[in-house]
Image (spheres, grey):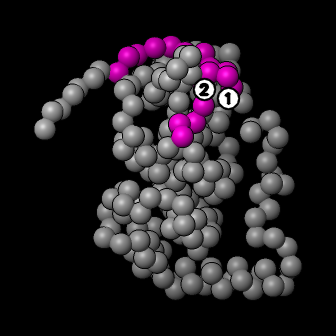
Amino acid sequence: MNDIHLKPTQKFITFSKYNLVVHQDAQKALLIWHQFRPRIASINIGGLDDYYRPPLRLVIGKDSTYYFFNEFRRFDEILIEETSSRQPCLVAAESLRDIKRLAWSEVIELAFSRGINHPEFFKAISNSAPKSIICELMNIERLTVDNYCRFAGISQSAYEYQQCKLANDEVMLGLPKNLSWMETSYGSH
């Protein structure tokens, strides 16, 4: 087996919506992350000196387009608030398997978020995520509700309660399940 070790290039890059794009193998993960991400304020590191900001991992494509595949919250902040700031980056060779792992790890971390709807989240990852990568990241054999509950640190009865409560709320209100479009700022997309 040939191991090729390519060193990443370190660069300072100023991003715009034209030179920064989500990697195609991370698009589904980003969509699910946007759907379930907690709506919390984040720490403003925009005022930090360039050299002290955490480096971002990217791959470069044709025409000097940079592709991101993880750190979704950070890239949201950059594209909304920090488009004029230089960002420290590690530009690496494209490794599709690692890109998928990093992208889906961003999503899987949401299982530990406060206030997440576990039944809806489980449904989203079981329908959209590559099962082998999800199982690897969660360190489980099969993606089942029981294994998910153990990974997320919740009891199966809490999962089932949340599932029933959601079904009852929908019947009573007659509203669509996902009203996150009401909270979305139009400038972030």
Precedes in sequence: disc 1 or disc 2: 2
Q: Are marks 1 and 2 in contact (CB under 8 Å)?
A: yes
Q: Residue at x 27, y 23 (%)?
A: 6
Question: Percent x, y for residue 74?
Answer: 58, 35
Q: Nearer the viewer, mark 1 or mark 2?
A: 2
Question: Percent x, y for residue 35?
Answer: 66, 56
C-alpha separation, residue under disc 1 versus residue under disc 2:
9 Å
Is 31 rendered above or below residue 91? Answer: below
Extent of the magenta region: 8-24
Work out whether residue 92 can be spotted. yes
Query: Camera-side residue: 43 or 134?
Result: 134
Looking at the rendered structure, which numbered label has been put on residue 42? none
Looking at the rendered structure, which numbered label has been put on residue 20? 2
Give amino acid for label 1.
Leu
Q: Secondary structure at mark 1?
A: helix
Q: Secondary structure at mark 2?
A: strand
Q: Is residue 15 magenta?
A: yes
Q: Residue at x 50, y 13 (%)?
A: 12
Q: Quadrant of the N terminus?
A: top left
Q: Residue at x 53, y 30 (%)?
A: 67
- For label 2, the crowd category at 10 Å Cα-Cα, with few meaning under 14, some 14 to 19 and many 20 or more, is some
Is 76 rendered above or below residue 88? Answer: below
Q: Is residue 94 left or right of residue 154?
A: left
Is 7 rendered above or below residue 135? Answer: above
Query: Camera-side residue: 116 or 126?
Result: 126
Give amino acid for label 2.
Leu
- For label 1, the crowd category at 10 Å Cα-Cα, with few meaning under 14, some 14 to 19 and many 20 or more, is some
Q: Which residue is mark 1?
A: 79
Q: Is residue 76 left or right of residue 169?
A: left
Q: Quadrant of the C terminus?
A: top right
Q: Residue at x 36, y 36 (%)?
A: 95
Q: Is residue 96 left or right of residue 184?
A: left
